[in-house]
């Protein structure tokens, strides 16, 4: 587990972008695992800038998103499909059929989870998976006590997660109670993982992930067992981590 300390959010986004651009320049068929939320927005802005400056192309890239709310239409402004389209996809040259998210409106959600797993396998698995981390240690929507052996599945969202995401909705009542998420095993099959962490409010959980025991009570702690994890965190997020 490599930990890269940076000054602030902007520096975190810059460093993550540099790593991804280097990967894409060495492998035009890079398979990216993508995340949503406020943490990766700076990264996506920088990837768009790199594309506009002709440093990279996404024409042969495939992307798989970590998760999607169950029940939201693609054009719902709170769906992750909408987020990814507006924050990244519509600004770059990636073909629509190569930018994949779980279909949370599928008639058979269990079958959709299996289909998504198969698509990742057919793509040769994910080369670089971008992760953020929840205040309770979740990665993707894998809440505390999710089995490490899990694959893509439907999860009931923890109340703390719904509260954290309520700022994007008109009220907490509008926040979905379920989501489809890549499982922990699915995430751990990625060849490389980049965990982005910014802000003092993430300091407690990041300290547990780096120095705590590996336990399903803290899903992100499993990253200690991955052979190629890079944590890019700012000074505020690392304020409770020693010896970094």
Image (tube, helix red, strand yellow):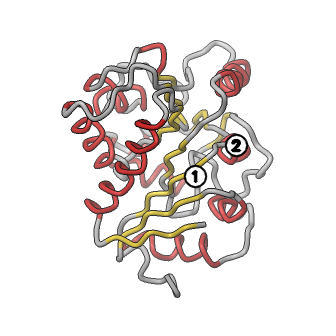
Q: Is residue 54 above or below residue 244?
A: above
Provide residue 137's location: percent of width, then percent of height: 58, 62
Under tag 1, what secondary structure?
loop
Q: Residue at x 47, y 13 (%)?
A: 97
Q: Residue at x 45, y 21 (%)?
A: 60
- How many marks do you count on the picture? 2
| C-alpha distance separating marks 1 and 2 | 14 Å
Which of 2 and 211 lies nearest the eye of the viewer? 2
Mark 1 vs mark 2: give the one in front: 2
Q: Is residue 216 above or below residue 148?
A: below
Picture quarter containing residue 7?
bottom left
Give whichever of discs 1 and 2 has the lower sequence position: 1
Q: Which residue is mark 2?
A: 189
Which of 85 and 78 lies nearest the eye of the viewer? 85
Q: Which mark is residue 82?
A: none
Provide residue 183's location: percent of width, then percent of height: 69, 41
Provide residue 159's location: percent of width, then percent of height: 54, 53
Q: Is residue 132 above or below residue 96?
A: below
Image position of 1 (left or right of 175): right
Image position of 122 (left or right of 229): right
Q: Is residue 6 above or below residue 179?
A: below
Image position of 163 (left or right of 85): right
Picture quarter containing residue 181?
top right
Q: Residues within 10 Å of mark 1 (few under 14, many from 20)?
A: many
Q: Residue at x 60, y 70 (%)?
A: 209
Under tag 2, what secondary structure?
loop
Image position of 7 (left or right of 79): left
Q: Residue at x 66, y 58 (%)?
A: 219
Q: Residues within 10 Å of mark 2 (few under 14, many from 20)?
A: some
Q: Which mark is residue 139?
A: 1
Provide residue 111's location: percent of width, then percent of height: 73, 18
């Amino acid at each position: 587990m490599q930990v890269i300390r940076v000054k602030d959010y902007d520096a975190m986004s810059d460093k993550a972008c540099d790593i991804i651009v280097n990967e894409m320049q060495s492998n035009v068929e890079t398979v990216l695992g993508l995340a949503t939320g406020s943490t990766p927005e700076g990264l996506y802005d920088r990837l768009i800038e790199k594309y506009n400056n002709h440093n990279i192309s996404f024409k042969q890239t495939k992307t798989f998103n970590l998760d999607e709310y169950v029940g939201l239409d693609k054009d719902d402004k709170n769906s992750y499909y909408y987020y990814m389209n507006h924050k990244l996809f519509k600004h770059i040259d990636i073909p629509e059929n190569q930018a994949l998210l779980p279909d949370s409106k599928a008639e058979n959600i269990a079958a959709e989870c299996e289909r998504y797993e198969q698509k990742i396998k057919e793509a040769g698995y994910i080369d670089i998976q971008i992760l953020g981390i929840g205040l309770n240690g979740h990665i993707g929507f894998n809440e505390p006590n999710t089995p490490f052996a899990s694959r893509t599945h439907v999860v009931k969202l923890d109340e703390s997660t719904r509260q954290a995401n309520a700022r994007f909705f008109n009220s907490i009542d509008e926040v979905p109670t379920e989501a489809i998420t890549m499982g922990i095993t699915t995430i751990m099959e990625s060849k490389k993982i980049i965990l982005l962490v910014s802000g003092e409010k993430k300091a407690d959980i990041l300290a547990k992930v780096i120095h705590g025991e590996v336990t399903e009570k803290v899903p992100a702690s499993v990253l200690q067992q991955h052979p190629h994890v890079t944590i890019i965190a700012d000074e505020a997020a690392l304020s409770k981590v020693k010896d970094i």
